[in-house]
Amino acid sequence: ISAFGLQQRLNIPRAEAQMLIENYFEKYPQVRTYIDKTIAFAREHGYVQTQTGRRRYLRDINSRSRAVASVAERLAMNSPIQGTAADILKLAMIRVHHALRSGNFQTKMLLTVHDEIVFDLNKSEQETVVPVIRDAMQSALVMRVPLQVETGIGRNWLEAH
């Protein structure tokens, strides 16, 4: 986010917004390194990719128009992270589907909401199926940092939170 954007969102002076951004990158220099390396990779190769190798091509990354290139740069920064999250969810859905099927469970996967999967849980299976679902989701993609899955149970999505 730019100092201007942060100024608008927080309703603070631009100088203060700029200071917040600088302090953030000073405290977390690896974030700046990630951003710079990711944009440089995108400029050289014309794409970025998720942890699973799925590519997002960025035809405008080397545009002469600064405004157009800036949009592509933001996509370059966000796509590997957001795309990997989407990949993990899809892989988790596949693993859960197979686990439910092989266990002959009556519980059904209904839909996704952002990074969550909503199920129609057969109450009699609750003690058995919830750990099966959690394990299937947590093992969707093996990474250096283990995935943590939280579960909630309720009569509706709101109650489950």
Image (spheres, helix red, strand yellow):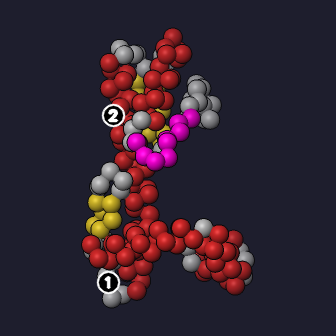
**Residue 93: x, y in percent?**
37, 35
Residue 107 lies in magenta, yes or no?
A: no
Mark 2 crowdedness (10 Å alpha carbons): few <14, some 14-19, many ≥20: some
Q: In this view, does 12 lie to the left or right of 44?
A: right
Residue lying furthest bottom: 64
Q: In this view, does 24 lie to the left or right of 43?
A: right
Residue name at image x 57 percent, y 78 percent: 2
Q: In which quarter of the image is the N terminus?
A: bottom right
Q: Quadrant of residue 43?
A: bottom left
- Which residue lies at the image location 40% right of the left edge and 86% below the top edge? 66
Task: Let me know if residue 29 appears in the view.
Answer: yes
The segment highlighted magenta reads 142-150
Read off the residue under disc 2: 94
Residue behind mark 1: 63
Q: Residue furthest top?
A: 124
Q: Is mark 2 on a helix, strand or loop?
A: helix
Q: Which amino acid does label 2 sit on?
A: Ile
At which x and y percent is residue 156?
Answer: 57, 29
Give the residue at x 36% y 24%: 99
8 is higher (above) or lower (below) than 143: below
Q: Position of residue 26 (x, y in %)?
A: 63, 74
**Quarter of the figure with residue 39:** bottom left
**Could you tell me what secondary structure mostly forms the magenta stretch?**
loop
Q: Residue 7 carries which label?
A: none
Q: Which of 158 and 138 is in front in this view?
A: 138
Residue 25 point in image, percent of width and height: 60, 73
